[in-house]
Image (cartoon, rainbow, N blue to C red):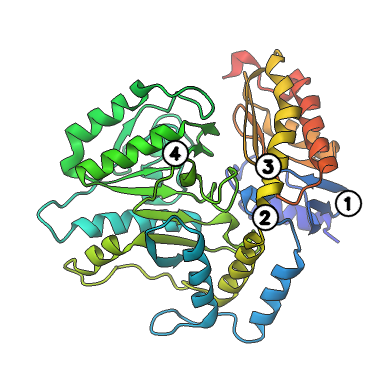
Amino acid sequence: MFSTEDSEFDRHHLWHPYTSMLNPLPCYPVASAQGCCITLETGQQLVEGMSSWWAAIHGYNHPDLNRALSEQMVKMSHVMFGGLTHRPAVALGRQLLAIVPQGLSKIFLADSGSVSVEVAMKMAMQFWSGGQQRKQKFLTLRGGYHGDTYAAMSVCDPDNSMHSLWKGYLPEHLFVPVPQCAFDHPWQESEADALRAAFAEHHHSLAAVIVEPIVQGAGGMRFYHPQLLKRIRELCDRYDVLLIADEIATGFGRTGKMFACEHAKITPDILCVGKGLTGGTMTLAATITTDRVAKGISNSPAGCFMHGPTFMGNPLACAVATESLKILAKGDWSQQVTRIEQQLKTGLYPLREHKNVNDVRVLGAIGVVECHRPVAMAEIQAFFVNQGVWIRPFGKLIYLMPPYVISEEQLAKLMAAIFNAVEQDALFIPPDSF
């Protein structure tokens, strides 16, 4: 049982994400999790609306994932990947290459999503290090988010993101305006004008463009038009610039396609995946690239790619990831995501008329309610727990990214809780405070 002493120790000594140690946000002790429910130490059950930050796509405690983990554990939990290899890594590699966009063929197994972005950016820079053009700059969209590590922060929105604090400390890269043409709106060719101008002026120094395909996640939960992604691919080809697709949040079916790049029918030069790769069971990510990029890196002055995490290719994580991809290969995810999307549209779109709501957006298994005012985090979290749901808003956004296996009844409960929250003015920061 989680004691009062445990809670006090947690509060005073354990740092939680994006939380002050002087006045930390409340944390709710979890006893167990099963399917689409989290059970607190109090015995209260919460319907999971976040997929544990978008990763637990098959729900919790999935028997096939648990079995893969257990079977691998008795063989070996870990061996170094330098000079050694193993079946789980090879099996995972085969599964990945069977589903990623055509043309991607070389896989670097990383520890986490943010690390996979660091790896991708290093790949792009090292690719250009051996030629006459030592390209070192990156171009990206404002409103983006790519992780909390050093290089990843440098390509997040420099002014309107959680990383604006580090402006002036990070390498300075190039940004074009936030996409305005929504996913389901008519395409406006002028949307690509800023990109065309940036390429024309800076392509000699651009190592790569890095974008979150179609969905800008933690930077604002925006869904932009697939034609913009097509234009980025065309410009990269015209000016010989690499394209990095950060699919850490969108990969493995979340947007209704296996990868969001498929909405635009394009293949990036480098693909980053994570989160759902292991079904949320363990931390693992991958950076996948083309033969051309891999050869360019290998022909650079270093003669090899200069990166190698201690836990690269961890056998436990690889075994679970392989099993997670086998579950996806059965094809049920497509029908599940389609059903979730339809229910989210039917259930959330009426909130567009609410006085506290600015917009409602749905794509695949993602539902976003953008409010006029930022949420009061501690208060709205407590409200949702009292409603029997786990929803973790940020800023002005209350959103859902449920596990694909969620039932209609569970999803209805999540949406009802959002409706109830939007009615409560006290759950939002007063207008004169922001």
For label 2, the SS is loop
> What amino acid is labelled 3 in the image?
Thr
For label 1, the SS is loop
The crowding category of the residue bearing disc 3, from other C-alpha atoms within 10 Å (few below 14, some 14 to 19, many at least 20), is some
Q: Nearer the viewer, mark 4 or mark 2?
A: 2
Q: Nearer the viewer, residue 405 or 282?
A: 405
Q: Which residue is mark 2?
A: 56
Q: Which residue is mark 4?
A: 163
The answer for how far apart the CA atoms under marks 2 and 3 are is 18 Å
Sequence-earlier tag: 2 or 3: 2
> What amino acid is labelled 2 in the image?
Ala
Rendered position, 289 above or below 220: below
Residue at horizontal 34 percent and vertical 35 percent from the top: 231
Q: Position of residue 364 (x, y in %)?
A: 62, 40
Q: Nearer the viewer, mark 3 or mark 4?
A: 3
Q: Which residue is mark 1?
A: 42
Task: Spot the residue most to the right.
Answer: 43
Sequence-earlier tag: 4 or 1: 1
